[in-house]
Amino acid sequence: MEIPEIKAAVELLHPRLDSSSVPGQIDGHIIHDLLDWLRQTFGFQKDNVENQKENLILLLANIQMREGRTARHGERSNHVFQIQSSTVIYLMKKLFQNYISWCRYLDLESNIEIPSSATRPATQQPELLYVGLYFLIWGEASNVRFMPECLCYIFHHMARDLYGIISSSFDPLFRPDGRDDAFLKLVIQPIYNVIRKEALVNKHGTVSHSMWRNYDDLNEVFWLKKCFNQLGWPMDLGADFFSAAKKMKNVTEVTH
């Protein structure tokens, strides 16, 4: 049995012919849906895109059904279903709750902006691009997921890039160059390497905490507004945040 809400969610992710924000092709490659466009624009991995696409489709369909925004069961066969704009808005509020709180704490304006020329209630495609972008960032974040404000920092800058692209043909500051691991290599891997180095220094928790940084210590950097000047975008790999873990000197190791 086909579930009309899922079919409607799949259809919602297809680029609209009347939308100038998402081209039908990039460098000759056909764009199949909004997340595919994000993959080819920012260099996300294909498997991540497929996973998050399924996740997004099911979320939209479930919210539509759970919130009673669909027709009764007996009417299903006689109607063409659409995902309502209230469903997309509900998902955005839930998904970006922490990001909005982070922006308020740092006295920042949210970078989730909808181009005035693209405000078409029937498509909600700009909104879904932001949702898809966040899911794709999270999908490749690995251990960086334990640093939620770091993810906010990454999303904040990529959302700004996304708005520039869909509103004025802006080129992102880091380019995928045809690679489907550009985001992983250029954004996530440098942060992951810092986490890994700090973990090696702590020697399974036997070294004094003053000699290494845990997830909370690293994430705390992104609670400070000065991180924007210290790290920048694309992130400056020469910044102190990316420096090697402190060398152990005169550290008494605890033996088991």
Image (cartoon, rainbow, N blue to C red):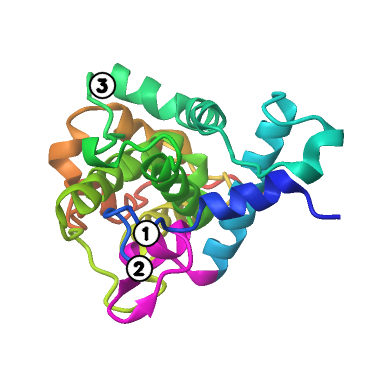
Q: Which residue is situated farthest in the front direction here?
A: 78
Give amino acid for label 3: Leu
Q: What segment carries the magenta color?
A: 25-46
Tag in front: 2 or 3: 2
Mark 3, other Cα within 10 Å: few <14 / some 14–19 / many ≥20: few
> Are discs 2 and 3 less than 8 Å apart at CB?
no
Q: Which residue, given by chain and number where applicable, does mark 3 sit on?
A: 106
Let me know if residue 213 appears in the view. no
- Identified at 51% across, 71% down, the residue is 46
Give amino acid for label 2: Gly
Give amino acid for label 1: Leu
Tag in front: 2 or 1: 1
Q: Which residue, given by chain and number where applicable, does mark 2 sit on?
A: 24
- Identified at 57% across, 56% down, the residue is 53
Q: Which mark is residue 62?
A: none
Mark 1, other Cα within 10 Å: few <14 / some 14–19 / many ≥20: few
Q: Which residue is situated farthest in the bottom direction here?
A: 28
Q: Is residue 138 magenta?
A: no
